[in-house]
Image (tube, rainbow, N blue to C red):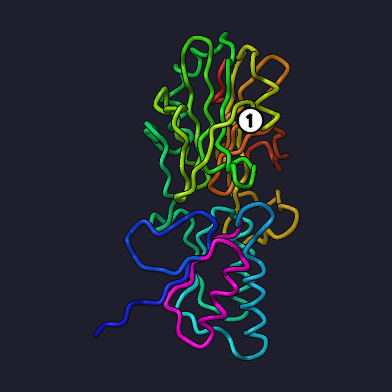
């Protein structure tokens, strides 16, 4: 009889989408308990996310693995797969584990894991952000001069916190409902009038809510007229750079579109990507470029709205 592979997934929201069987932990505490329970058996795969919700991260689990190796009794793991969409966090995890000779593979954006999300009517359509923004440019420009009636974000009522894995929904007085979501760093979904906001969404099987005017940055622009929009960019680095401290801006490999900044007169609403989530903030401060000829230096200008 063929033994089933022993796979552990530590992730606050994602699950395997390819049908493989795994034991799953949603917090670092339950992850440690799960690893401790299987301390003396072989693990075929250990999949690790970095950000585990609220203030929890994977680092207590990393420290458990490091301590075991320091004591010359490392965990018996075939491969550790780091699937976090947090590039700095993933780089730190990889460096820490490889230092103790654990076999590590980085798999950011691996389609094997993802969110089991149910949002009534939503027809998500992810494309690389520059492609998406070029294709949607005319539709976005048509919103200029319209007032933002209401904005919605998803919320976990049990914890009373906003859930950035769910899309941001903006309804304008001309009748358009703009639905924005980011994934895998720089993939952007822009859809129009597909989400039925009267039906609560679910995420990882957990009922959630649509809430208006949250966070404060969204409340601040509600009722104001859209005057323009622009794409925003963040730097990326090659795999050899140490990203654990201040970013080495002299070693930027290029720039990637990471956000859409909507301008409402003197107020900005920045809807941007972050670790496979869709974040909302007031305004955007561009990172300082090391040189004017940095690759993609004019990308924001090419994608700029009126």
Q: In the rendering, at what x and y percent does residue 187 appear?
A: 47, 41
- Region rendered in magenta: 25-51
In depth, the one of 51 and 32 nearer the eye is 32
Is residue 255 visible in the rendered image? The answer is: no
Q: Give the quadrant of the N terminus.
A: bottom left
Residue sitting at 60 percent across and 53 percent down? Answer: 237
Q: Which residue lies furthest to the front in this view?
A: 158
Residue sitting at 54 percent across and 23 percent down? Answer: 170
Q: Residue furthest left?
A: 1
In depth, the one of 186 and 39 nearer the eye is 39
- From this view, report whether residue 223 is shown above or below residue 253: above
- From this view, report whether residue 274 is shown above or below residue 63: above
Is residue 279 toward the left or the right of residue 17 in the image?
right
Residue that badge 1 annotates: 270
User: Is 28 colored magenta in this rendering?
Assistant: yes
**Secondary structure state at the residue bearing disc 1:** strand
Residue sitting at 45 percent across and 79 percent down? Answer: 43
- From this view, report whether residue 243 is shown above or below residue 196: below
Q: In the rendering, at what x and y percent does residue 81 appear?
A: 48, 67
Q: Which quadrant holds residue 22?
A: bottom left
User: Is 195 colored magenta in this rendering?
Assistant: no
Q: In the rendering, at what x and y percent does residue 60 appear?
A: 67, 69
Is residue 186 toward the left or the right of residue 65 in the image?
left
Q: In the rendering, at what x and y percent does residue 201 appear?
A: 46, 38
């Amino acid at each position: 009889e063929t033994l089933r592979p022993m796979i552990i997934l530590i992730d606050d929201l994602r699950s395997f989408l390819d049908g493989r069987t795994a034991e799953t932990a949603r917090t670092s505490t339950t992850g440690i308990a799960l690893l401790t329970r299987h301390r003396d058996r072989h693990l075929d795969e250990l999949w690790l996310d970095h950000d585990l919700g609220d203030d929890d991260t994977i680092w207590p689990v990393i420290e458990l693995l490091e301590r075991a190796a320091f004591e010359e009794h490392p965990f018996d793991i075939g491969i550790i797969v780091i699937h976090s969409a947090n590039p700095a966090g993933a780089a730190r995890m990889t460096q820490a584990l490889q230092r103790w000779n654990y076999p590590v593979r980085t798999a950011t954006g691996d389609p094997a894991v993802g969110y089991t999300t149910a949002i009534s009517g939503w027809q998500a359509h992810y494309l690389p952000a520059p492609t998406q923004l070029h294709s949607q440019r005319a539709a976005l420009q048509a919103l200029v001069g319209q007032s933002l009636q209401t904005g919605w974000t998803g919320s976990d009522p049990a914890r009373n916190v906003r859930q950035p894995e769910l899309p941001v929904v903006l309804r304008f007085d001309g009748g358009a409902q703009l639905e924005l979501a980011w994934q895998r760093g720089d993939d952007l979904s822009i859809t129009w009038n597909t989400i039925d906001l009267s039906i609560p969404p679910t995420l990882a099987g957990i009922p959630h809510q649509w809430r208006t005017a949250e966070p404060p940055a969204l409340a601040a622009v509600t009722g104001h007229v859209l005057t323009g929009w622009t794409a925003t960019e963040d730097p990326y680095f090659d795999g050899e750079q140490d990203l654990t401290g201040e970013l080495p801006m002299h070693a930027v490999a290029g720039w990637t579109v990471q956000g859409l900044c909507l301008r409402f007169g003197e107020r900005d609403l920045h809807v941007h990507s972050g670790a496979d989530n869709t974040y909302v903030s007031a305004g955007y401060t561009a990172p300082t470029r090391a040189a004017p000829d940095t690759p993609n230096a004019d990308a924001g200008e090419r994608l700029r709205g009126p």
